[in-house]
Every structure is written in C-alpha cells, then in structure tokens.
Image: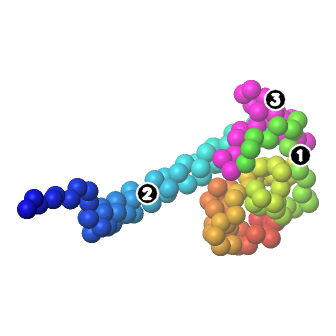
C-alpha cells in the first residue's frame, strides 16, 4: 500500500501565519499613521507660518494689515498648500470676520471652501482642520496647528 503525502498547509498552520502577520501589523502600522499625522500638522503649521510672514511684512511696510492674502506673494502664484484641502486657486483669500474675531466661526475644512481664514482688521490668519472623531479632538488639533487655546469650536475671540 502506497502512502500518499498531502501537499499544502493545514488550517492550523495558516491560522498561525495570519496571527503572526496581524501581530506584526499591529506593531508596525500605528507609528506609521502617527508619523503621517505629525507630518500633516507640521505641513499645516509651515503653510500658516508662510502666510503670516507675508501678512506681517505687509504690516511693517504699510502700517496696516493687508486687505487680502494675495496668491502673487508666493512661489508659483499659489497659496501654501493645506494638507487637508485641495489647493485654493482663487485670486485672494479675504474672508472677513468681526473686528474682534481672532478665530473663524467655521474651523473645519468640511465647513468651508477656503482652507484659510483671514481677518484684515486684526491680521489674524488661521488654517481650518479636518473633523476628528470627537469635538475635543478637533479642538485640540485646531489649537495645535494654529498655536491657539480655544475651548470650543464656536469660539471666535482670543
């Protein structure tokens, strides 16, 4: 009688391999996603800083805040890119607030076409952020990127 040898893997062997791969993925992927989020925050802060520098230069040269944020101030006639919104291709960003506003009413990219908010009465410029899992996480991201300390998404003053 000939003994037949089975080829292939048993269900138990496949299950062990899948479990090992899942453990490796659980170890490897969280740091990658965290690094990506940190990179987006850094990119947003750099874009915001580039705009703020131009606004401050205009103020020093003319003694008043510019009426608009002009595309022509930047390389390639493009506003610095927001990591969370398609590049804005309009002529200028001139989104007005009330005289005492330092933060927009709409703080998330989903709530407005413009990735940036600018108040020419105060010189304040902010970048909108994506909505997070909770309101407190959205507020924390907004504060981190804009170097602010708001307590809720409806806050418009300092």
Q: Which of marks 2 and 1 is in front?
A: 2
Question: How packed is label 2: few (under 14 Cα within 10 Å), some, or many (20 or more)?
Answer: few
Q: What element carries label 3?
A: helix
Residue 9: mark in rendering: none
| Residue contact between numbered discs 2 and 1, judged by CB atoms under 8 Å | no
Q: Where is residue 155 in the image (x, y as percent from the top left)?
A: 79, 69
Q: Quadrant of residue 131?
A: bottom right
Q: Cα distance, mark 3 to mark 1?
A: 14 Å
Q: What element carries label 2?
A: helix
Question: How packed is label 1: few (under 14 Cα within 10 Å), some, or many (20 or more)?
Answer: some
Residue sitting nearer the eye, 28 or 80: 28
The residue indicated by pointer 2 is 29
Label 3 or label 2, whichever comes before in sequence order: 2
Label 3 or label 1, whichever comes before in sequence order: 3
Q: Position of residue 71 (x, y in %)?
A: 81, 33
Residue at left offset 78%, top offset 49%: 116
Q: Quadrant of residue 93?
A: top right
Residue at left offset 85%, top offset 61%: 101
Residue at left offset 11%, top offset 60%: 3
The residue indicated by pointer 3 is 72
Asked whether 66 falls inside the magenta stretch, the response is yes
Q: What element carries label 1?
A: loop
- Per the rendered image, the range of residues in magenta is 58-84
The residue indicated by pointer 1 is 94
Q: Cα distance, mark 2 to mark 1?
A: 40 Å
Q: Position of residue 130 (x, y in %)?
A: 69, 59
């Amino acid at each position: 009688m000939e003994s037949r040898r089975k080829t292939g893997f048993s269900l138990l062997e496949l299950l062990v391999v899948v479990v090992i791969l899942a453990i490796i993925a659980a170890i490897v992927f969280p740091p990658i996603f965290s690094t990506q989020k940190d990179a987006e925050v850094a990119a947003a802060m750099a874009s915001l800083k580039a705009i703020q520098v131009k606004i401050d230069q205009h103020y020093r040269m003319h003694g008043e805040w510019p009426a608009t944020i002009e595309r022509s101030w930047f390389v390639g006639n493009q506003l610095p890119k927001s990591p969370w919104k398609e590049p804005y291709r309009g002529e200028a960003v001139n989104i007005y607030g009330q005289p005492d506003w330092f933060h927009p009413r709409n703080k998330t990219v989903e709530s407005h076409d413009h990735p940036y908010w600018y108040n020419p009465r105060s010189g304040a410029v902010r970048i909108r952020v994506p909505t997070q899992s909770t309101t407190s996480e959205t507020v924390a991201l907004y504060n981190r990127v804009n170097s602010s300390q708001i307590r809720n998404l409806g806050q418009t003053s300092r």
